[in-house]
């Protein structure tokens, strides 16, 4: 079983989730940060996981484009969709329908909201300024949920 993980990670939280996922998945795993390179054709894999960080309610545009262009191929294999964000899970679940093709969301074997992080030290001045104004927080923190990641992978593999 060969699994492809296509994701975007701007500051590193999504990448950390992918690394934790890799350790839970069985078989061969190939992961591609679509922000740093081109994603392989999903037809070359048995199953595909797709994830993105959320900024202002939207997934990364490259992840969105990948899903739109590869929908037909993705519908031919098991797919899992995941998000990394700080929004409460009940709000974050709406992001799937708003950001991924509806047919892909309906086809997905599982979806998951895996937590997120704020890494102020990795942001530029403007990003830090805006985030401080909007959130009121000034310190970095992380709430990546390892149990959710394990549950997500377990559902995907069942």
Image (cartoon, rainbow, N blue to C red):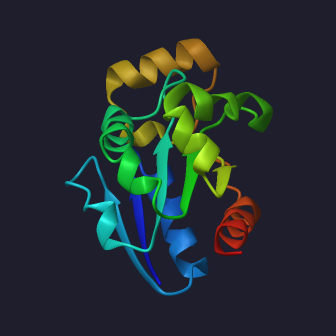
Q: As displayed, is residue 46 above or below residue 127?
A: below
* Residue 12 shown left or right of residue 147 in the figure: left
- The residue shown at (46%, 33%) is 59
* Residue 30 shown left or right of residue 37 in the figure: right
Residue at the far left: name it.
Answer: 37
- The residue shown at (65%, 58%) is 109
Q: For residue 41, which quarter of the picture?
A: bottom left
Q: As displayed, is residue 135 above or below residue 63?
A: above
Judge whether residue 105 can be spotted in this image. yes
The residue nearer to you, when weighing 67 against 71, is 71
Percent of width and height locating residue 87: 68, 31
Please identify the quadrant where the C terminus is shown. bottom right
Judge whether residue 8 can be spotted in this image. no
- The residue shown at (56%, 85%) is 26
Percent of width and height locating residue 19: 49, 69
Percent of width and height locating residue 33: 32, 56
* Residue 67 shown left or right of residue 151 in the figure: left
Residue at the far top: name it.
Answer: 133
The residue nearer to you, when weighing 97 against 89, is 97
- The residue shown at (64%, 18%) is 136
The residue nearer to you, when weighing 131 against 92, is 92
Q: For residue 40, which quarter of the picture?
A: bottom left
Percent of width and height locating residue 46: 43, 74
């Amino acid at each position: 079983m060969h699994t492809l993980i296509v994701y975007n990670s701007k500051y590193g939280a999504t990448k950390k989730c992918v690394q934790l996922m890799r350790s839970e998945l069985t078989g061969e795993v190939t992961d591609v940060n679509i922000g740093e390179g081109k994603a392989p054709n999903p037809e070359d894999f048995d199953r595909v996981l797709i994830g993105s960080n959320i900024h202002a309610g939207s997934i990364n545009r490259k992840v969105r484009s990948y899903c739109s262009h590869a929908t037909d191929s993705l519908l031919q294999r098991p797919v899992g969709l995941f998000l990394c964000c700080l929004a409460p899970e009940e709000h974050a679940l709406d992001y799937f329908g708003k950001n991924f093709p509806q047919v892909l969301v309906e086809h997905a074997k599982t979806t998951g909201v895996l937590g997120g992080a704020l890494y102020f030290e990795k942001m530029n001045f403007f990003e830090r300024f805006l985030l401080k104004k909007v959130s009121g927080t000034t310190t970095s923190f992380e709430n990546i949920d390892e149990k959710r990641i394990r549950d997500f992978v377990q559902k995907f593999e069942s």
